[in-house]
Every structure is written in C-alpha cells, then in structure tokens.
Image (cartoon, coloured by chain):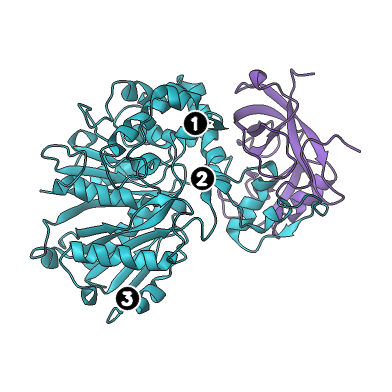
Chain colours: A cyan, B purple
C-alpha cells in the first residue's frame, strides 16, 4: 500500500471582521497565506506543483499558480461538495494527488474578503432572483430563468425567503429539539466553550471578547432557534495547508502529520442538503447527514471515536457541532445535548476537547479550512489550548450539506 | 385579489424546463407533484428522471394542499424591502391522498397568520395561495387550528 500523504506546514494571514480587509485583493491574501504555509514547511514556492480548493473558489488555481511563479502546475483541483462541506475533501484530494504521483507538493487554500464580494450573512444576495429586493417599487414578480442546477434548486425555495444558511440549518435544528428535547442552553454552551478557547488564541477575532451563557441567551434571534451567538463569524482573511508525500515529508522543518483517513460525500438524494432539500430522508433530517461518511472514515482509519484526543468540528452554527457529535459516534442519536452538558468539549478537563482555536464561531470563518490548520497545530503541540500528548485528531467540514472529514495523526 | 402576506420585493422564482409546469400550475392555484410514469414514485422539486427507477417519463398529479408541519424556523431578518418580521419558513409533510406510491413528499414554504406560540411540529396545515402577479402564485400554508 502506498504511503500516506502528510501535512507539513500551515499558514494564515491576519483574520478580521468581514469587510475590514480592503487594501489588498482577496487573491493577494490567498498568495500570502500560501507563501506563509510553504515557509512553515521549510519549503520554497518553487517546490509547489499543485493547488487545491473548494466552495466555488473565486481564486482560481491557474491564476494563483501564475502569480506565485510555480515552475509547473501539475494538479489544480476543485471539490464539488458545496460551501464549507469541501474543506476536508480538498485536503483529501491533495493527499490523493501526492499519493498517486500526480504532484509532489500540493497547497490547499482559502481566502475570503466578504467586503470585496458578497457577505455570507446576506445569504444568496448575488442570485438573480434577489433582483427585486433592493427596490422600493419593484416590478411585478415573474418567473426568472435558472441558468444552472444551483439556481434552479435555489429558485424553488428562495421565494419563501430561504436565502440564508441560518434559516437553512435552523430547520433541522428545530426538529432535533422536537425529537430529543435539545435546548437552546445546550447550544449556548457550545458557543461559550469555543469562545473560551478563542480567548487564549491571539489569532482569533474574538480573542479579547468574553462570552457568557447569559450573553448567548440574550443575543438577538436570527432564525429561531439560532441566536446571534449560535451563528459563526463573517470574516476576512486567508489560510493554507501544505500536503506532500511521506518521502518528502521526512526531512522538512516540522514533524509530519499523517493524513490517516479521509472521506467525503452525501447520502442518497441529499443535493444541497437542508438549504434546498425538504425531502432529506426522515431518519437523516435532524442529523448533520454525515453519519455514513463518518463510518467510512473510522473504518478506513482503523480507529474509533474513543481514540480521538482532540477534535476540530465544523461550526457554522452551534447545532452543526451538536449533530456531528452524534453522526461521528461520540454519543448516540439525541444524546448530544447531555454530552455537551457534561463539559466534554472544553479544553479544560473535557473528554473531547473541540475547536481548540475557537472555531468558526470565535476564531474566524475561513469556510472551515482553519480547522485543518488547528488540527495540525494541535498535533504539533502548537495550539493555544494544547491537549497534552495529543496524537489523533478528527477534523470535519460543514454538516447539513454534502461534507467531508479527516483523521490526522501526529505519531 | 387574494390575500397578501409578502411584498413584491421578495426573491423571485428561478425556473428551468423541469420546474416550469409546476409554476404554471401554481399560477392557477393548483399544488402539484411530479410522479414517475414507470414506478409511480412522486417527487419535488421537479427533476428530469426518477431517482428510484431512472425513468425519464413522468406526469403531474394535483394534491389537496393538506399536510402537517415537519419543521419550521421563525426568521427575524428581512430578505426583502417592506417585509413583515418575523416570518416563518416551514417544511410541510404533504398528504399524498393515495397518489403514486404514497412515498413521503415535503415542500418548503411559509406558515402565515400564525401566532408563534401556536407553531408545533406535527400540527395539521392547509395551503393558502398568495397571488404575487399574473404569472407567480405561491403556496403558503396556515395552521388548521388557527382561525
């Protein structure tokens, strides 16, 4: 069997609240993050021969390769798993590329400048169906042509006001509460725990901002049951991860982190998940939809949830973490509320320290690629909330949409 | 004039060849589902082939517009100018009235005229059409228990 690919370097730019980075372009930020990650690995940009990304990236690999001066681009890859579901899949594809000899050093990157482009919290504001929204005296509603599968899917639900991720993921969360008695306070404990981690992380946008459960409960309702502090940050910045072969990893600057197992995908009939699909199977509706890929992941790794020392779980919303705890088998269906009540997610004494960087909720929202950076750091001993002797880390991407995940091991 | 709950500035339908017949029926206040000619499996949103038997032959069946509330969210941020807040986005489990195989079909929509305290998963609902224009009508839903 071919040797596994490894993560050998990570890097990011500064992270800010959305709209705060205007002096440089988004693709310049991507280049900065890539160069930082390459330097972290002890490599030169001339060593890079592959670029991989996800989530309809505006910063196409072909242009970045030219701007960065790569001697030759041998692998340029984009994941189909939408939005934040594809972060771990981009790492998986980079790993496949180096394991099969398509390329030797592949950098996975993500740059977001929500002030220069659309703000995520505004939802699908760029879609043509929104055309009426800014006008005081709009033309009569009509049927607009959908020019892609995504537009057709969105166009079937947008007239009801379904344009934000908060509303999309509130629907399965409400049903989870109905089925299992899960509470808003349990969601709030997730937000508070990750904030406590971010309060130790100088990179975190919320580094100096404390959050109490009372603050969470008193925060504005966005899409019931999600309060403001159930929703992730909207951020500007960029980050990158360097993936290479076992052979090349052996004599670089840092101890290589093995990409032990990867999995990506979606259940039958899932399409764009809870965003556009009211017909997700009943048994999957109040879940993250990631149980099947989680099972494949554990099987491929030869590990179980009990083997995980630290987890970086995608948190666009608190509920995403709650549902993934069940999907990935850290507790049974409906049991995540009690699991959270036990303090499990806390770096301080928790049984499953999670999002030790503060996550999307409190460090920065980089479409979840920042979770991979923290996964590597938590195994290098570089985390601001370092779990002692951490060896196995689970990293996941967005739940509620087609998704992906990794198991990293530091050995 | 039918009753209005949402302003003209709401996001508009985006339609392709598959979904156009659904919107044309909706404009006549007929709620339809697409059913496979071969295996009778029913589906929404409209799609070119059946996910169960891959047949590309289908027809449209009109349903009653009755159903139950499967899930919902009360949204507190406007998506359009002049919108009344909060508004409720809901998933409706449609009564299939013996049509097709009887498989589950749900639709995303809104609950209108409901007090938030009345919202409860499992409650019975019924369609309430909102005529947005000559070409666009939308199936909103009301709780059957509300007046």
Tell me the number on the disc at residue A173. 1
Q: Circle 2: is it few (<14), some (14-19), or many (20+) Cα within 10 Å?
A: many
- Classify A256 as above or below A197: below
Q: Is residue A208 in sight in this rendering?
A: yes
Tell me the number on the disc at residue A131. none
Q: Earlier in the sequence, mark 3 or mark 1?
A: 3
Tell me the number on the disc at residue A273. 2
Kindly indicate the quadrant of the structure image that contains residue A71: bottom left
Tell me the number on the disc at residue A68. 3
**Percent of width and height locating residue A169:** 51, 38
**Percent of width and height locating residue A32:** 32, 66
- In three-dimensional space, the C-alpha distance between marks 2 and 1, rounded to whole angstroms, equals 13 Å
- Classify A137 as above or below A326: below
Q: Earlier in the sequence, mark 3 or mark 2?
A: 3
**Would residue B74 be found to the left or right of residue B126 on screen?**
left
* Image quadrant where one finds the N terminus of chain A: bottom left
Q: Are marks 3 and 1 on the same chain?
A: yes
């Amino acid at each position: 069997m071919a040797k596994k690919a490894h993560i050998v370097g990570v890097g990011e730019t500064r992270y800010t609240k959305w709209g705060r980075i205007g002096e440089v372009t988004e693709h310049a930020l991507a280049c900065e993050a890539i160069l930082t990650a390459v330097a972290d690995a002890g490599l030169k940009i001339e060593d890079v021969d592959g670029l991989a990304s996800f989530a309809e990236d505006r910063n196409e690999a072909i242009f970045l390769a030219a701007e960065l001066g790569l001697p030759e681009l041998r692998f340029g890859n984009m994941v189909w798993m939408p939005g934040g579901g594809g972060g771990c899949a981009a790492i998986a594809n980079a790993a496949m590329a180096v394991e099969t000899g398509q390329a030797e050093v592949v950098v996975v990157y993500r740059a977001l400048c929500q002030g220069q482009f659309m703000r995520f919290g505004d939802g699908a504001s760029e879609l043509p169906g929104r055309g009426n929204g800014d006008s005081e005296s709009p033309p009569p509603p009509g049927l607009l042509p959908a020019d892609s599968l995504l537009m057709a899917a969105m166009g079937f639900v947008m007239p009801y006001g379904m344009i934000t991720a908060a509303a999309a993921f509130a629907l399965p969360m409400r049903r989870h509460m109905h089925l299992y008695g899960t509470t808003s306070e349990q969601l709030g404990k997730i937000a508070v725990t990750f904030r406590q981690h971010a309060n130790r992380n100088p990179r975190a946008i919320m580094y100096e901002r404390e959050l109490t459960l009372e603050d969470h409960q008193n925060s504005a309702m966005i899409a019931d049951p999600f309060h403001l502090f159930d929703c992730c940050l909207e951020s500007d910045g960029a980050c990158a991860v360097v993936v290479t072969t076992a052979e090349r990893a052996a004599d670089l600057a840092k101890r290589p982190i093995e990409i032990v197992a990867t999995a990506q995908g979606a259940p039958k009939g899932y399409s764009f998940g809870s965003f556009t699909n009211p017909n997700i199977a009943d048994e999957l509706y109040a879940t993250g939809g990631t149980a099947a890929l989680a099972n494949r992941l554990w099987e491929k790794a030869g590990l179980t949830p009990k083997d995980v020392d630290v987890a970086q779980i995608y948190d666009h919303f608190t509920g995403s973490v709650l549902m993934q705890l069940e999907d990935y088998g850290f507790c049974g269906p409906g049991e995540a509320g009690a699991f959270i009540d036990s303090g499990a997610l806390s770096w301080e004494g928790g049984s499953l320290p999670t999002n030790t960087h503060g996550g999307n909720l409190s460090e920065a929202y980089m479409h979840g690629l920042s979770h991979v950076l923290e996964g590597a750091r938590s195994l290098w001993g570089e985390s601001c909330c370092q779990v002692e002797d951490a060896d196995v880390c689970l990293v996941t991407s967005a739940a509620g949409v087609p998704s992906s995940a990794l198991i990293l091991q530091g050995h | 004039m039918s009753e209005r709950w949402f302003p003209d500035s709401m996001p508009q339908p985006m339609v392709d060849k598959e979904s156009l017949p659904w919107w044309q029926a909706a404009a006549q206040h007929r709620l339809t589902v697409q059913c496979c000619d071969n295996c009778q499996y029913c589906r929404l949103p409209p799609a070119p082939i059946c996910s169960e038997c891959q047949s590309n032959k289908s027809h449209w069946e009109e349903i009653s517009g009755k159903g139950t509330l499967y899930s919902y969210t009360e949204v507190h941020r406007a998506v359009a100018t002049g919108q009344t807040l909060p508004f409720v986005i809901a998933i409706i489990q449609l009564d299939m009235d013996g049509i097709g195989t009887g498989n589950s079909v749900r639709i995303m929509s809104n609950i209108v005229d409901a007090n938030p305290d009345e919202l409860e998963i499992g409650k019975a609902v019924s369609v309430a059409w909102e005529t947005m224009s000559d070409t666009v009508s939308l199936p909103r839903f009301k709780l059957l228990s509300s007046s």
